[in-house]
Amino acid sequence: MQPDMVADMFNEMTPILIAENDCVIVTGSSLINAFDKLEVMEYSAKAIVSSKVLGDIVAITDDEIKDLRAAFH
């Protein structure tokens, strides 16, 4: 993938790119902000992998996402 194409993938809602079997690229307003996003991504990935022993992951609906955003933003 070309660098320009990769750069175009990032925006405020997509600050992290996971390149399959290769690397993770994180953007942020500062080094500590980018590290925080990387840490959240890492623990989220661990939670997803660990949850597989409990069964299939159940996705939340768009309405539930809106409710969470309203409650925590």
Image: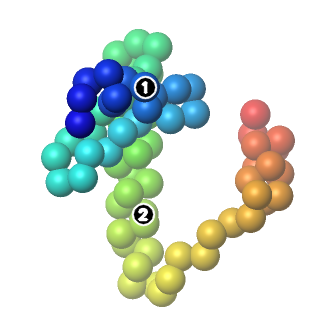
Q: Which residue is mark 2?
A: 47
SS type, badge 2: helix
10 Å crowding of disc 1: few (<14), some (14-19), many (20+) = few
The amino acid type of the residue labelled 1 equals Asp
- Asked whether, in this view, residue 62 is left or right of residue 53, the answer is right
Task: Give whichever of discs 1 and 2 has the lower sequence position.
Answer: 1
Q: Which residue is mark 1?
A: 8
Q: Measuring 39% from the left and 52% from the top, which residue is drawn there?
A: 43
State whether residue 44 is above or below residue 55: above
Q: Measuring 20% from the left and 42% from the top, which residue is drawn there?
A: 23
SS type, badge 1: helix
- Residue 35 in view, yes or no: no
- Locate the C terminus by quadrant: top right
Rendering coords of residue 56 (x, y %)? 50, 83
Q: Which image quadrant is residue 7 in? A: top left
Distance between mark 1 and mark 2 Cα atoms: 29 Å
The amino acid type of the residue labelled 2 equals Ala
Rendering coords of residue 58 (x, y %)? 60, 76
